Structures are given as structure tokens and as C-alpha cells.
């Protein structure tokens, strides 16, 4: 499988996918027809989302089609060269994937070799479940079970910072709650501007900042950019 | 019905329920046996949680029992004078309420006149669903449907502030996503240190800061402390 799972689309003060151009270019090399899944969008249109992504991917020689516009979405998954899943609300994205019966077809197509690109919610749904999303549960999917393309959870947009003078759990505290109730499932926390790349050569952590690995019963561990052996 | 729904248990730099003493004293007046639901706790014990709450409620003449320690939790709900539901993780809390079959009994007991106190997750579950919680979905409840003691959603710990130099949605953006997908359901956002009181005389917003009302298609509206007519 070939996966590029980005923490986020847009760095603070940066442009849409601007920090990920080289990674995307390499990952999508040879893929002409990219099927884009815009279902995480809530307050902007799917067409608008497709246009934004198409503009970024066009220099790589990719033609981007929105899955919402395909007459037969499952056939579109089977026919595409690569799949990209954008960010937004993870619950909405997963609910729609169930609604259109797309989880099995996408999983199969990626297992068959089509490169998968996700950012934010699109990285969350690549995990076994969406239990480590940061999003508000504005709609109820039939299940939290997701694509399971990696055997651990990702927490995108990871930060140790909190809102000044405000209560509530920090991100690390939330992830420790996750581990307490899901002790066999580790979490890879990706800071903004970083990503996980997986292909036949193994896994790599991309970006200028370390990831943070959370394993039940252990202290959270910084994971330097470069080869990642998993948990 | 008599409801006291607090945004939070602990103000920044404050003590546990310290800001809410007068409200709790008045609300629990005449209630001796308070049944406490500690199921939102994830990383601390239910017994510890009960002890903390009992210490706060003891000056009001209340005896606090943890529902987890009751031989028959449903019978304990029926027999208590008041019900208190503490904060923590909303998904965990709701999952346990389903597991022990407590939603209908608690709803019934409160409709029959037992005062209900909730804070944070305990205020979330008093709403029709938990779709406006801020918590991470670390476990999957059978449904997002909750007690429905009020006919609108509450967002506790509300803040307009965001983590500096970090992407991701603000709280208001998240709530606008909720409204987009749930257009008939308004949201009452309670800043920290504030609460909603409901009894036979109507509803009151408590605290020194305004609440924020979100209604689909309208600009969010500040709601001053004092009588609240609903949406």
C-alpha cells in the first residue's frame, strides 16, 4: 500500500497544501486520474473543494474528479489511479462513506496499489476507527470503524498547547483517555506540517518536527522525522 | 423539572465547584440523598470522584452516593432525592448510561421532580444528543441520543479563543457546522463560570458573562445573565 497521511492541509499563515507540494508530487507520480472525496466539507460546497484540490494537483499532471459527481461512486473508486480524501469534519466524512457504501471499495482499491492521500479528517479515516479525531460529533455515523489502512490511530493537528486561561483537557490528556479505554491501540500524533508516508519500503515520518507516539502504560515518546518502524 | 446545568466544574485557577456553591446550595435545598453519576471519569476512580463531590455537597446537608456502588442502579435512581452527573468524557459517560439502562429511569425521575445537577459532560447528556460535546470520541456509545431534559443543545466550556499559531476550527466554526447539519436545533453556548438554571419559574442564565445563542441562519447572539426565554 502507498499512503500519504498529512496532519493538516494548511500551516498557520501558509497556503492550502503549500507545505506538502513535494510530498504530493512524489506520491502521485504516475497517477493521472485522482478521485477526490470531499465529504468532510460542511460549510462549503463539494465542487468548490474539488476545484481547490484540482488546482494544487494539476501541476503534477493529475486530473481530479469529485466522487460526489460520479454517476457510480463505487465504479469510480475501482477505475481511479489514486484516491485523495480531504479534511473537514471527520464524523460527516465517515457518515457519508457509509451512506454510499465506499469503505470496502476504497480499502480494496488502496490494497490493490492505488496511492491514498489524506489530510486531517482524511487521515483520521485511514485509521482503524475515528476515535482519535479532534472534531465535534455533529452527525452520527453508523459506526466509528473506518478504513484501517494503518494498524494504529493517528491524531492530526497535534499540539501540546492549550487555550490560555481556559479549563478542559489538553490534547495529551485526551489521548491518554483514549489509551485508558483502548489499551491495545497506539496513537501516532502528527504535529501540523508533518505527515506519515507508507509504501513498500516501509514508513517515514515527514516534516521538520517530531511526531509523538502514545502507547498505553508508557511515557509519550518523541519520534524524529525519518524512518518509522511502527509500534 | 429542576435543572442546574453548569458549563464547567472548575474555573481557571479556581477550586472544584468553587464558583457554583451558592447555586448548588439553593438547587439542592431539601434534597438529602444525592445520587452521583461518576461515569464520565476515565483516568481517575469513581470512588475518588464521589469523595470529591461529597466533600462539596456535605455543607448543604446532602449525603452523596455513587451510582456505581449501588446494588441496583435503577432502584437507586428511583429512590434518590436528587441526581448529579459529573464531567469528564461525554462519550464514556453516555456509553455507560446505555450499558446500565439508566437513560429512561433518570429522565423519569427528573420529570417527577428530582433536581438534576450536571457540569460539562453532565450538562451535555442533559441535551437531546451529545452532538455538541467538545470531547474526543474515545469510546462508541450505541447512539448519540441523550436525556433530552432541555429542548436545545448546550456547548459547555465555550470560548471564542483559539490556540495561538495553530490551525483547526474555532469553537464557533464547529457550532456553525453543527447548525448546518442540524438546522432545527439551536445551541446555547455556556462560557466557563456560567450555568443554565431551569425550574417551574422558567429559565435563568447564571454567572458574570453572557451566554451565546446559535440559531441556524442567524448571527450568534449574546444572551445576558438573567431570565432566558429559550429559542
Image (cartoon, coloured by chain):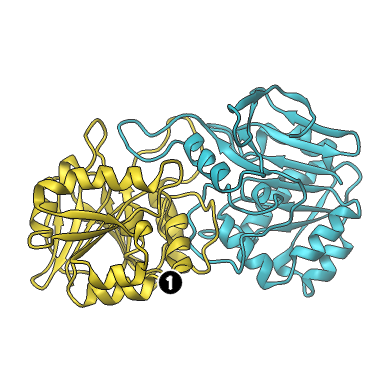
Chain colours: A yellow, B cyan
Image quarter of residue B162: top left
Residue ID at (66%, 31%): B194
Residue A45 position in % (x across, y down): 40, 44
Badge 1: residue crowd in 10 Å (few <14, some 14–19, many ≥20): few
Using the rendered view, name the quadrant where residue B46 is placed. bottom right
Is B176 displayed left or right of B113 in the figure?
left
> Which residue, as the protein is rendered here, is positioned at the far front?
A71
Q: Which residue is mark 1?
A: A101
**Residue B224 position in % (x across, y down):** 70, 22
Left or right, A129 with respect to B186, comes to left
Residue A127, percent across and down? 33, 66
User: With respect to residue B226, does B62 lie above or below?
Assistant: below
Q: Is residue B87 above or below residue B24?
A: below
The residue located at (60%, 69%) in the rendering is B142
Q: Nearer the viewer, residue B32 or A99?
A: A99
Q: Quadrant of the C terminus of chain B?
A: top right
Say left or right for A117 vs A163: left
Name the residue rendered at 58%, 51% in the picture: B131
Image location (x, y in percent) of residue B9: 63, 41
Q: Secondary structure at mark 1?
A: loop
Residue B41 visible to an observer of this rendering = no
Q: Chain of mark 1?
A: A
The residue depicted at 29 percent of the width and 68 percent of the height is A76
Amino acid at each position: 500500500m502507498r499512503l500519504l497521511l498529512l496532519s493538516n492541509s494548511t500551516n498557520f499563515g501558509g497556503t492550502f497544501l503549500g507545505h506538502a507540494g513535494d510530498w504530493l508530487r512524489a506520491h502521485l507520480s504516475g497517477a493521472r486520474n485522482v478521485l477526490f472525496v470531499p465529504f468532510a466539507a460542511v460549510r462549503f460546497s463539494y465542487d468548490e473543494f474539488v476545484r481547490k484540490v484540482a488546482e494544487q494537483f494539476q501541476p503534477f499532471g493529475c486530473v481530479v474528479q469529485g466522487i460526489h459527481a460520479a454517476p457510480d461512486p463505487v465504479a469510480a473508486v475501482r477505475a481511479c489511479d489514486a484516491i485523495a480524501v480531504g479534511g473537514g469534519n471527520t464524523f460527516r466524512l465517515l457518515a457519508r462513506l457509509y451512506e454510499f457504501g465506499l469503505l470496502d471499495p476504497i480499502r480494496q482499491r488502496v490494497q490493490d496499489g492505488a496511492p491514498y492521500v489524506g489530510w486531517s479528517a482524511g487521515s483520521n479515516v485511514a485509521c482503524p476507527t475515528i476515535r482519535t479525531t479532534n472534531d465535534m460529533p455533529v452527525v452520527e455515523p453508523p459506526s466509528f470503524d473506518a478504513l484501517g489502512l494503518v494498524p494504529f490511530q493517528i491524531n492530526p493537528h497535534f499540539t501540546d498547547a492549550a487555550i490560555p486561561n481556559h479549563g478542559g483537557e489538553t490534547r495529551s490528556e485526551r489521548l491518554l483517555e483514549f489509551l485508558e479505554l483502548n489499551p491495545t491501540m497506539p496513537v501516532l500524533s502528527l504535529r501540523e506540517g508533518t505527515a506519515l508516508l507508507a509504501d513498500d519500503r516501509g514508513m517515514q515520518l515527514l516534516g521538520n518536527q517530531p511526531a509523538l507516539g502514545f502507547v498505553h502504560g508508557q511515557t509519550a515518546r518523541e519520534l524524529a522525522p525519518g524512518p518509522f518502524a511502527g509500534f
